[in-house]
């Protein structure tokens, strides 16, 4: 139990890494563009290379958290730590709990804990990106993909299906997916209902 709690703490701390702020170099992404401190907003503000850097950093912090958690507490530690990194990214205490939407971090969690599902997620994301119907309904889109992530995690755990290089699929995997999914859907809902900030100096 102590090892698992330690994994959760390390994961949350990893999630606090302010990738967008580091790459933005003084430009506050919460006060510019869409107001979201994530890769998409940084891409719009500073270009594709900056956005890709933020995406890789956000993905990497959950992946690293999962690896550290696994070394501390095995299967449950990997899932708890990776999910905690997503929660830290979405609700960072050092930024007034105003974090990103968690998509890149969740991909890092999948890579660390459920790589068998990752190709499905990437394929669904590609389809949604090309569909005007789904692009106009981001909350519904992310809720559907997160629901599938959690549901298939339960199937993998229930039947002990192969999980590539990740830890054995067990009960902690769908539970961690559900926790991260709830945070992501919430952040998307908040962003969908929020008025973008006014441009600086206006």
Image: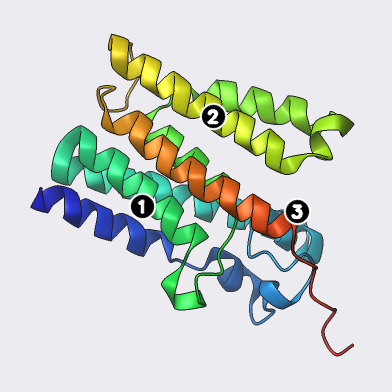
Label 1 and label 2: CA atoms lie apart by 18 Å
Residue occupying the point 9% across, 53% down: 2
| Residue 64 can be seen in this image | no
Residue occupied by mark 1:
84
Q: Residues within 10 Å of mark 1 (few under 14, many from 20)?
A: many
Mark identifier at residue 147: 2
Earlier-in-chain disc, 3 versus 1 = 3
The quarter of the displayed image where residue 175 is located: top left
Residue 128 or residue 71, whichever sits in front: 128
Residue occupied by mark 3:
48
Q: Residues within 10 Å of mark 2 (few under 14, many from 20)?
A: some
> Secondary structure under badge 3?
helix
The quarter of the displayed image where residue 75 is located: top left
> Secondary structure under badge 2?
helix
| Residue 126 can be seen in this image | yes
Label 3 and label 2: CA atoms lie apart by 29 Å
Farthest bottom residue?
201
Q: How is the image coloured?
A: rainbow
x and y percentages locating residue 55 in the rendered image: 60, 51
Q: Does residue 39 appear left or right of residue 154 in this picture?
A: right
Label 3 and label 1: CA atoms lie apart by 28 Å
Q: Residues within 10 Å of mark 3 (few under 14, many from 20)?
A: some
x and y percentages locating residue 125 in the rendered image: 68, 31
């Amino acid at each position: 139990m102590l090892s698992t709690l330690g994994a959760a703490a390390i994961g949350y701390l990893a999630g606090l890494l302010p990738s967008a702020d580091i790459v933005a170099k003084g430009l506050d992404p919460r006060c510019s563009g869409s107001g979201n401190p994530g890769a998409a907003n940084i891409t719009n503000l500073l270009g594709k290379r900056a956005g890709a850097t933020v995406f890789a950093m956000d993905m990497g912090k959950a992946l690293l958290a999962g690896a550290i958690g696994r070394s501390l507490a095995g299967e449950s530690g990997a899932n708890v730590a990776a999910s905690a990194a997503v929660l830290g990214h979405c609700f960072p205490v050092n930024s007034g709990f105003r974090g990103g939407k968690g998509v890149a971090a969740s991909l890092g969690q999948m890579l660390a804990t459920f790589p068998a599902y990752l190709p499905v997620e990437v394929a669904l994301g590609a389809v949604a990106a090309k569909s005007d119907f789904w692009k106009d309904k981001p909350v519904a889109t992310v809720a559907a993909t997160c629901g599938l992530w959690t549901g298939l995690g339960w199937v993998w755990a229930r039947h002990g299906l192969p999980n590539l290089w990740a830890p054995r699929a067990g009960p902690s995997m769908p539970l961690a997916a559900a926790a991260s999914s709830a945070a992501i859907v919430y952040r998307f809902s908040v962003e969908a209902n929020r008025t973008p900030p006014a441009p600086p100096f206006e």
